[in-house]
Amino acid sequence: MKRKHRKYIVAGLLLSLLAMAVLSNLHFLEKAKQSCIHNDMEPEVQTDFLTINWTVSCK
């Protein structure tokens, strides 16, 4: 396999892993918000870039 092709494969894999991490994080953020709603509370959400760091407060 040529070196150039290997670089593209590695870059694609890294981008795929980043996308899966962001989507997984979004899923758990939604679960946390739904947990507040399920307990008859209002969720207050604070997120950072790409929702990597987030906080949910139930009030």
Image (cartoon, rainbow, N blue to C red):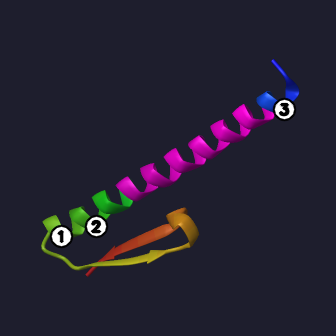
Q: Is residue 8 left or right of residue 56?
A: right
Position of residue 27 relative to residue 10, above or below, is below
Asked if disc 2 and disc 1 are in contact, CB closer than 8 Å, the reply is yes
x, y (%) of residue 13? 64, 36
In the picture as drawn, the residue positioned furthest to the right comes out as 3
Position of residue 9 relative to residue 48, above or below, is above
Of the residues tagged 1 and 3, which is closer to the observer? 3
Q: Which residue is mark 3?
A: 4
Mark 1 or 3 closer to N-term?
Answer: 3
* Boundaries of the magenta span: 7-27
Of the residues tagged 2 and 3, which is closer to the observer? 3
Q: Which residue is mark 1?
A: 37
Q: Which residue is mark 2?
A: 33
Q: Mark 1: which secondary structure?
A: helix
Residue drawn at x 70%, y 32% is 9
x, y (%) of residue 28? 37, 55
Nearest the viewer among 58 and 13 is 13
Amino acid type at circle 1 is: Ile
